[in-house]
Image (spheres, grey):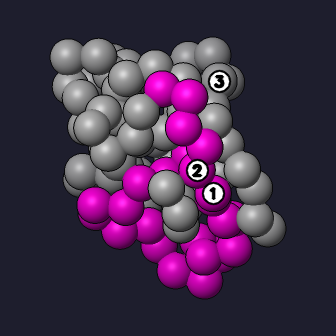
Amino acid sequence: MIQRFRVFGESMSPALVDGQHVIGESLTYRFRDPEIGEMIILKCPDNEMNLIKRITKSDGGNYFVEGDNKNQSRDSRNFGLIQKNKILAKIIYK
């Protein structure tokens, strides 16, 4: 499924900027696991808000995600690893 998402904040700057729209799709990860370096949309484990982050590490089933702008990002450094089922979509267009 293809969805449009709006970027809020500067956590993915300079790759993505506040107010920008991105396109995500949710089928890829039904057929393969997410890969390091991919930008994803996920449900935050703390508050169920949608976040856009980059996968930086994987232990096989859990993922460490970070914003590109580390000083402005709430990410796995705050809430820990995320499970694959928290990933909503892979960013396919920015």
- Check residue 81 for magenta coloring: no
For mark 3, give the secondary structure: loop
Q: What residue type is labelled 1?
A: Ile
Residue bearing mark 2 = 22
Q: Is 63 situated above or below 52?
A: below
Q: Which residue lies most toward the right here?
A: 1
Distance, label 3 to label 2, CA atoms, is 16 Å
Residue bearing mark 1 = 23
Q: Left or right of 36: which side holds 28?
A: right
* Quarter of image, res 59: bottom left
- Check residue 23 for magenta coloring: yes
* Quarter of image, res 6: top right
Q: Which quadrant of the rendered structure holds the N terminus?
A: bottom right
User: Are there few (<14), some (14-19), or many (20+) residues within 10 Å of tag 3?
Assistant: few
Of circles 3 and 2, which is in front?
2
Q: What percent of the width, then of the height, locates residue 84?
A: 54, 55
Q: Which amino acid does label 3 sit on?
A: Met
For mark 2, give the secondary structure: strand
Along the line of sight, the residue nearer the viewer: 58 or 92: 92
Q: What percent of the width, then of the height, locates residue 23?
A: 63, 57
Distance, label 1 to label 2, CA atoms, is 4 Å
User: Are there few (<14), some (14-19), or many (20+) residues within 10 Å of tag 2?
Assistant: some
Q: Which amino acid does label 2 sit on?
A: Val
Q: What percent of the width, then of the height, locates residue 49?
A: 65, 24
| Numbered range of the magenta stretch | 18-44
Q: Residue shown at 37%/61% (left/top)?
A: 38
Distance, label 1 to label 3, CA atoms, is 17 Å
Q: Is 50 situated above or below 46?
A: below
Of the numbered discs in the image, which one, if any, rests on residue 6? none
Residue 36 seen by the camera: yes
Residue bearing mark 3 = 49
